[in-house]
Image: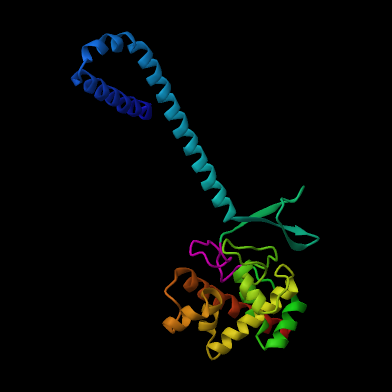
Amino acid sequence: MSLLRNVKIVLLLSMCSAWSYASDSEGAAQHLPQVADSSENTIDRYDAMVLEVAAKTAAEEEKRKAESWKNQEAKTFKFYKFKQQDAVAYSDKAPAKREYQVIVYNSCYACSALSTVDWKVTHLYTDEFTYSIQKASEKYGVDPALIRAIIHAESNFNPLARSNKGAVGLMQLMPGTAKDMGVEDRHDAAQNIMGGTRYLDLMLDRFNRNLTLAIAAYNAGPSRVEKYQAIPPIEETQTYVKRVKILYQRYRSQREIVSKD
C-alpha cells in the first residue's frame, strides 16, 4: 500500500505541475473547462498508470528473488549418506526405504569454522579405498595416514563431493590442478587419489617437507603460503590446517594400534 501511495503522490504532483504551467500560458482560460470536464478520465488514466507501475515493480522483485535463489542453489551441492550392506554409501538422490543423512557442500568438509564436528572423536575411515591410497603412497612416498587425513578433510570420503568453487571428488581437485597432475577423470576415485597425492607431494617438496605449510598450500595455494611464509591469515585455511593435523595424528595412531595387533 505504501508503494501505491508514493506512486500516486508522484503522479499527482506531475499532473499538478502540468496544469499550473497551462494556467500561466496564453489562452489557458480556454483550456481550464476542458481540464475540469476531463478530470474523471484523467483520474482513471492515473489509476491505470499506478497499477501498471506497481505490477511492473512486483514482477521485477519476483524475478530478482528467483535469480537470487537460483544462484544460491547453484553454489550448494546436496548429497545423501546412508548404509548399504553394512558399508557407507553416498548418492545425489535420496535413497528409498532407508535412513539417510543429508550432507550439503559449500566448501571442503573440514573448512567451515562453524562445523559442529568434534574432530578428535569423529569416525575414521580406515578401510575405504585402501588399494588406491596404498598405490599412491608407494608411488609418491606420502604417508597413507596423511592421504587419508586430506581425503577426510576435503570430502569426508565422499567420491561424489563437489564444492562451490568447482573442486571435485575425494581429494577435491580443481580442473586445472587435475590436468596438471595427469588426471583425466576427476570423478574416478583411483585417479582422484593419485592426482591429489601427487599434488600433495609437490607441496611437501616445495616447502621442504614442512607438513604445516604443505597442508596450508593444498588448501590455499602455494603462492599465498610463500607470500606469508606461514599459514595465510585466512580463516578457512587456518581451520583446515588444524583439523587435518588432528586427523593425521589420529590415522597414524590407528595404524599403529592395528600393526601391534
Q: Is residue 112 magenta?
A: yes
Is residue 253 something that shows in the picture? no
Residue farthest toward the right in the current orientation of the protein:
85
- Position of the N terminus, as image quadrant, is top left
In this rendered view, identify the residue nearer to me: 138 or 145: 138
Q: Is residue 109 left or right of residue 193?
A: left
Q: Residue at x 37, y 30 (%)?
A: 3
Vertical arrangement, residue 146 with respect to residue 12, above or below: below
Q: Is residue 127 left or right of residue 11?
A: right
Q: Is residue 180 left or right of residue 234?
A: right
Q: Which residues are magenta?
A: 107-122
- Position of the C terminus, as image quadrant, is bottom right
Q: Position of residue 226 (x, y in %)?
A: 46, 83
- Magenta residues: mostly which secondary structure? loop
In this rendered view, identify the residue nearer to me: 35 or 202: 35
Q: Is residue 108 magenta?
A: yes
Vertical arrangement, residue 219 with respect to residue 11, above or below: below
Q: Position of residue 240 (x, y in %)?
A: 52, 72
Is residue 197 something that shows in the picture? yes
Q: Residue at x 72, y 52 (%)?
A: 93
Q: Residue at x 60, y 79 (%)?
A: 248
Q: Position of residue 206 (x, y in %)?
A: 55, 88
Q: Position of residue 60 (x, y in %)?
A: 48, 38
Residue 91 placement: quadrant: bottom right
Q: How is the image coloured?
A: rainbow
Residue 85 placement: quadrant: bottom right
